[in-house]
Image (cartoon, grey):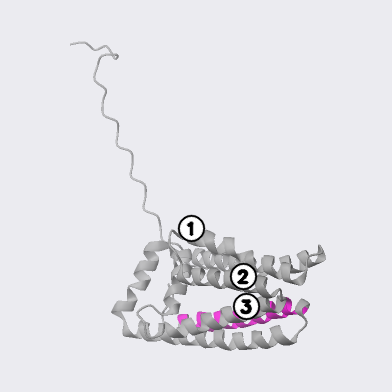
Amino acid sequence: MSTDPMTAPASPPAPSPAAPPASPPTERQKTAALRRHLALQLLFELALPLAAFYGLQAAGLSQWAALAVGSLLAAPWLVHGMVRRGRVDAMGLFTLCLMLLGALMSLVTGDPRVLLVRDSWLFGLIGLWILGTLPTRRPFVMYMAQTVVTAKIGEAGWRAWAARWDAESAFRRHVRVLTAVWGTVFTLDAAVRVVLALTLPVDSVPLVSTVQWVAVLSGLILFHKRYVTRHGLKA
């Protein structure tokens, strides 16, 4: 029998060692992922439109044009989020539609206050929609948690967390309480925004409105975080 290495049958390759299973994220990693996600939201949905408004005005654009361009800068961020997650986010799509509707209406009137009041419509309609989800099997907090929980612990972690809805009545009750709080605050915030948009000078409304929303959002997030921790909803 030939022992020529060129004609000898090749020995089967040694099996490669199996990769060790990925360890679950630590609490510090979860918190870092959530903070990164919130920071990007604040950057693209608040800071960038605000900076664009004042920057474009300084460059010579009218109040209407600066508001229109600045308000639409958040659209690519919303679309990118849906593409990255591979699904259409109901709230993101709703926000995009209202942004485009407000821009089209302002084209007809040419009044920058129409764009400013548009933000009030947006928050008011979102607030009413949030409250409208209360009796459904998927209240708003479940929509919101999908993005947040997935950012912290991935799709598998989200599915495990969401499965508690069917298994725990206390979980459903707490989710609905949080949904009611978010919906009420959004609706009341919209009323305040209408007053600001119609009474303050146009140049000052974006800054005042943004500062107000940061304060409201910070309070909401603080309440939400404490409530989630106290009632065992944390992912």
* Mark toward the start of the polypeptide (2 vs 1): 1
Q: Is residue 95 left or right of residue 23?
A: right
Whether 60 is drawn above or below 116: the answer is above
Q: Amino acid at mark 1?
A: Val
- Give amino acid for label 2: Leu
Disc 3 or disc 2, which is closer to the eye? 2
| Region rendered in magenta | 204-228
Which residue position is annotated with label 1?
83
Q: Nearer the viewer, residue 189 or 223?
A: 189
Q: Is residue 60 left or right of residue 1?
A: right
Magenta span main SS:
helix
Q: Cα distance, mark 1 to mark 3?
A: 26 Å
Residue 46 at x, y = what percent? 65, 70
Q: Which mark is residue 118?
A: 3
CB atoms at circles 1 and 3 under 8 Å apart?
no
| Quarter of the figure with residue 69 | bottom right
* Residue 154, horizontal then vertical, whole percent: 42, 62
In which quarter of the view is residue 153 placed? Answer: bottom left
Find numbered disc 1 in the image and state the secondary structure of the residue it sits on.
Answer: helix
Q: Is residue 185 left or right of residue 68?
A: left
Amino acid at the residue labelled 3: Arg
Dot 3 alpha-carbon crowd within 10 angstroms: few under 14, some 14 to 19, many 20 or more: many
Image quadrant holding the N terminus, namely top left
